Amino acid sequence: MQLNINGKTVEADAAPDTPLLWVLRDTLGMTGTKFGCGMAQCGACTVHVNGTPARSCVTPVSALAGKKITTIEGLSANGDHPLQKAWVAEGVPQCGYCQSGQIMTAAALLKKTPKPTRKQIVDAMAGNICRCGTYNQIVRAIERAATAKA
Amino acid sequence: MKKPITTLALSRRQFLLGSGGLAIGVAFGLPALTASRKAQAQAAGLAPNQWVSIATDGTVTILSPAAEMGQGTMTAMPLCLAEDLDADWSKVRVVQSGHNPKLFGNKLFNGIMATGASRTTRGYYELLRLAGAQTRLILVNAAAEKWGVPSAEVTTENGVAMHKASNRSMGYGEIAGFATVPATLPAVTPAMLRKPADFKLIGRNVARIDLADKTRGAARYGIDMRLDGMLHGAVLRPPVQKDKVASVDDSGAKAVKGFIKTVPLPWGVGVLADSTWAARKARDALKVTWANEAPAKNYDSAAVGRDYVAAAADLDLSKAGVEVEKHGSAPQNIKSAARVLKADFIAEHTAHMCLEPMNATARFADDKLEIWSPTQSPSIATFASAAVLKIPPANITVHNTLLGGGFGRRVDADFTLDAALLARAADGKPVKVTWTREDDVRNDKFRPLVGQHLEVGLDANNNIVGWHHRFAGESIYARANPGAFKAAGGKDAPFHEGAEFLYDIKDHLIEFARQERGIDVGFWRAVGGGYAKHAVETMIDEVAALAKADPVEFRLRLLAKHPRAQAVIREVAQMADWNRKRPAGRALGIAYSDMWETHIAEVVEVSLNRKTGAITVHKVWAAFDTGVAVLPQNCVTQVEGGIVYGLSGALKEQVTFKGGVPQQSNFHDYPVLRMNEVPPIEVKILVTDNPPGGVGECGLPPVAPAIANAVAKLTGKRLRHLPFNPARVKAALTA
Ligand code: FES
Ligand code: FES
């Protein structure tokens, strides 16, 4: 089937019930989107579908015809989205495994709410687990990016 | 501070996919140490030892020996070498070393390559600095000879050698173009190393080299391995660990599109397929009958917990277990004490929940095995694979990929063995095995279920005259490191670590009563510290309360001979404004830990919903002294991460068993702390010139006792059963 990923139309040969996550990772070799739980619990697999954060681990590819998918690889041209820069400036990543999903969730938040309060940040990010415990650094990085954008 | 141009530019290739990346991986991996590689390196520059090579363009390549699991070791260890080499950090490239214990082993692990137990910086710090200093001397001597001046007149700065008197200078790259490694390497001693006051890199908060890639989805973890022609594997393990297969019906699996074959394994049944998803579907379609012979088939954690507490509390000498440590005569003193405090503690099993589920990739051809594994120990992966495949370790190459969290789980080789055995059945094709989260939880090497008993004798003035601490539980080392277990006469170092302390208590006895119920237990972040300090630090508070002493003052008195310990306690008390009265319903609790050569004290502010039993932690303060901190800000976030892991463990996490079957399987029934549950955490580092301690685990041990101590202040009730989930707290309140 055809998918629109990061602005490009790609052909993916996969069973229709296959979650987008595995089509991205196995079929298309886009491994920036991570597998953490497979049941919409951790947020590691977060991508944007038509600009809204979605859990690719529970989204079958059959549901995505004609929709615009954005992955971490397509968030910015050179890894220079304000959030990506803020993440480096705040030294957020530890193991880093959750961070693709964290950044994708945060990017959707800032698009909708460019100047989020701390509470809005925490509410939006509560679905993304970081087992290394970088939560407070993530909050700071989002606040930094929100200010930088202004 | 300039940023290194490198980032992971080179090191990432080690993990890269496809043929180009592989070629580089090989060049900088194991064969890096062969004669031909040395000769090659020589032609292109200078390679004075296994750790570093200097190219004629000035690029300094430094090998990093430890697994990068988030702790920043890939920046920190090379930085130590660069410090005494006086290298230009912007020209440094970092490469993950290959698996060669002779060259890269950690002295604190008897020379094998393993990352854990907070031993990397402690094990390599001086060694890498000496390697840097020696390399610098070789460069200096070569420059001096070229210029015809005494070596003593040559100085270095930031990758350049200088002779000030004649105003000449040469970059390291230029020197590398003509210098040769002398037959006898110049002698270096610790006394020759740079003094902390003169550090240019260590302690200067150099940015970690792995940050940018980790924000772009470009960092490659084990789970991201892709190789030409790679197959995918999944493994079905028995519901009760160590059960055996009675029969397999794989007709359902065969019907799955992409299924390739079924592979019997010693610990279950594997399938090979052409994608992760197909492998999983095929695995789930297997119908396996189990023999029902698992040793743990009757294992109910609630009942076992009670048994373990009883075993710990049973002082009958014949069941006393192994003496772990003995100072003075605690039991006798307790017998004749004016007053005795007794307490029983339970800690439930916990799971690691590394966000990257267990996985590994392997290729087996011509009796040779190549492995790509997110392992904490390529050495253990090698020995275990050699034993299972019955091939010599020399036939095995392990590439250590990045780890999406480790926390002790990835010391074990079980997931690597899945890939090794499935690869053997794959006709030379590489195989990646990816566990589901459910596989990962149910087949964790859990933190042990632990029973503890403490008896403390007091004299008439409430001075402690005897401290007797007993542990009961399944042994970690008996399974994971039987050699060390035997050599230590049945002591289980990681299991009961944290029971020793610096408190001035002369009569101290620690015992371990090993229990055997057939459950595999392993190393969970901070291991023994996660529960031993819960017992120790709450008891210290209890004695303080009895003596009507302030918990801060009481600890300071017992630590009079340890100024570093006192300093962190004083600091954290000040940060938390310890003596300020809190609003009604709020209280502070404190705890201290001396583990891994790091001193840390933490204070928490809590409140309690007495109706539900839910504890809220409003704020955490921590002060720590780990000696020299290579990357101070990174140390701070490591400690904060340890605190978050500790809060999660103390408040929520448990794996329970019924009939030998773990009852949890994913984040919905094994919740871990989320952002909306994390309080503000204030961490302060006190830098001293002491040798570096460990920081990956030290944040964790004080968390649970600090919370329990705060709750005791609020309610008078002692929380002695981990985790402190609402049901349990409620039970404690009405007890
Ligand atoms: S993998 Fe999709 S939410 Fe966890
Ligand atoms: S950085 Fe490791 S899980 Fe978030």
Image (tube, helix red, strand yellow):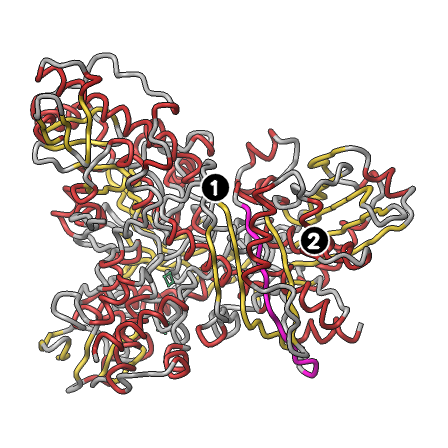
* Marking on residue B553: 2
Decide if residue B295 is on the left or right side of residue B323.
Answer: left
Q: Position of residue B427 (x, y in %)?
A: 24, 47
Displayed quadrant of residue B478: top right
What is the chain identity of the residue bearing mark 2? B
Identify the element where label 1 is drawn: loop
What is the chain identity of the residue bearing mark 1? B
- Circle 1 or circle 2, nearest the eye: 2
Q: Position of residue B595 (x, y in %)?
A: 56, 44
Decide if residue A94 is on the left or right side of residue B547.
Answer: left
Name the residue rendered at 15%, 79% in the picture: A3
Amino acid under label 1?
A: Gly
Q: Position of residue B593 (x, y in %)?
A: 59, 49
Displayed quadrant of residue B141: top left
* Marking on residue B461: none
Name the residue rendered at 80%, 58% in the picture: B548
Q: Nearer the viewer, residue A49 or B365?
A: A49
* Residue B224 in view in this figure: yes
Give the residues in magenta. Answer: B599-611
Is the C-beta separation of discs 1 and 2 under 8 Å?
Answer: no
Give the labeled residue for mark 1.
Answer: B693
Q: Nearer the viewer, residue B659 or A85?
A: A85
**Magenta: predominant secondary structure element?**
strand
Examine the structure image and report whether residue B99 is included in the region drawn in magenta. no
